[in-house]
Image (tube, rainbow, N blue to C red):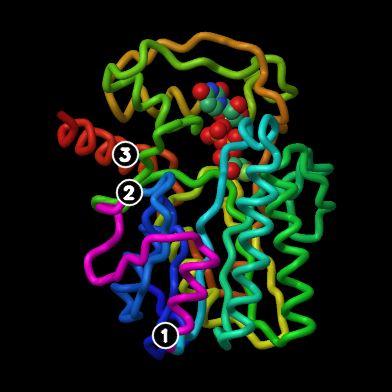
Amino acid sequence: MPTSSGKALKLIVTGGAGYVGSVCAARLLEAGHEVVVVDDLSTGHADAVPEGARLVEGDAADATAATLRKGAFDGVLHFAAKSLVGESMQDPGKYWRGNVFTAIRLLDAMREHGAPRLVFSSTAATYGEPEKSPIPETAPTRPTNTYGATKLAIDHAITSYANAHGLAAVSLRYFNVAGAYGRYGERHATETHLIPIVLQVATGDRAQVQIYGDDYPTEDRTAIRDYIHVTDLADAHLLALGRAKPGEHLIYNLGNGTGFSVRQVIETCREVTGHAIPAVVAPRRAGDPAILVAASDKAREELGWKPERADLHGIVTDAWRFTRELTARQP
Ligand code: UFG
């Protein structure tokens, strides 16, 4: 388990009742930090907030401001966001208000109350269709969907606040997060992600998985993604807290650097679950790039980050265990 700066920090985790936020909150607590979770529970679950973290229910900016007003904090990890790519194209206002406007109000609250550090959940979607693969942080940022555009806009705002006001900021650009950690895992009311959908076929909650497009310029004609275990992702947040410097905005890609096609993911899920998992080919999903694979050398070199669960079989095994436990808990 990596530690951050060595000293226990007092932190606010927005979105700490969600998938990635809850895993990060759990790992921060294990590393000895003090955690207050701010979450409006619009997509998160109160029972996903780890024991030992206090939950403040409310808007990521307003409730964080109110919490900062009551006590000094060392920093904020900002996970809370709208994150459905398809929805972002149909209802862009929800994303510009919900992601960008909220983030600006959060930055202002941090400035007003003197919270010195920010770790922000950015995304590979900021790059859009890449010119080369794997994608380095220096690649052009031309998002192909509103979700990615809002995350990129926030990254720009963070740079300005770091330059002008001395904020110590790190943006982490996640590739495809998967897997689970103990009782913390992916459970969205509207599930759009490949691995949980495929596993829902294995549990019998879905009849089949649709393969969105088999006309991509890849070996098996399906799209390729870089799957990263949620605990490896969480560990990068702890390292980022230790690396953040006043007046600097650092940006790191987080992925394993290996791509798996949709068909390879489905096949791995078949191996792990022992279920047949019927799959049918459907049209491409709008805005999906063919290949998204991360160059994460910068995170490895500067943060000392080393993914420990890069194996797709292991990632799916953890997600499958979580899915079965969740299914068993449901009435
Ligand atoms: N896919 C299917 N069938 C499904 C679901 C997904 O074929 O039922 C395909 C998608 O078309 C894509 C791949 O599986 O090619 C992965 O799709 P996900 O929805 O799991 O993930 P995305 O790559 O679309 O997006 C994820 C996050 C985004 C983030 C992006 C960055 O959801 O927030 O990774 O890489 F921006």
The residue that label 2 is drawn on is 45
What segment carries the magenta color?
Answer: 46-71
Question: Which of the 4 image quadrants contains residue 213?
Answer: top right
Q: Amino acid at mark 1?
A: Lys
Vertical position of residue 286 compared to residue 171: above or below: above
Q: Between residues 198 and 309, which one lies in front from this camera angle?
A: 198
What residue sits 37% from the left and 55% below the top?
17
Label 3 beta carbon less than 8 Å to ligand 1: no
What residue sits 71% from the left and 51% below the top?
150
Q: Name the quadrant of the C terminus.
A: top left
- Image quarter for ligand 1 equals top right
**81 with respect to 28 (left or right):** right
Crowding near pointer 2: few (<14 within 10 Å), some, many (20+)? Answer: some
- Residue 195 at what x, y percent from top left? 44, 32
What residue sits 61% from the left and 33% below the top?
87
Mark 2 or 3, nearer chain start: 2
Residue 70 is labelled as 1
Q: The residue tagged with tag 2: helix, strand or loop?
A: loop
Q: Amino acid at mark 3?
A: Thr
**153 with respect to 299 (left or right):** right
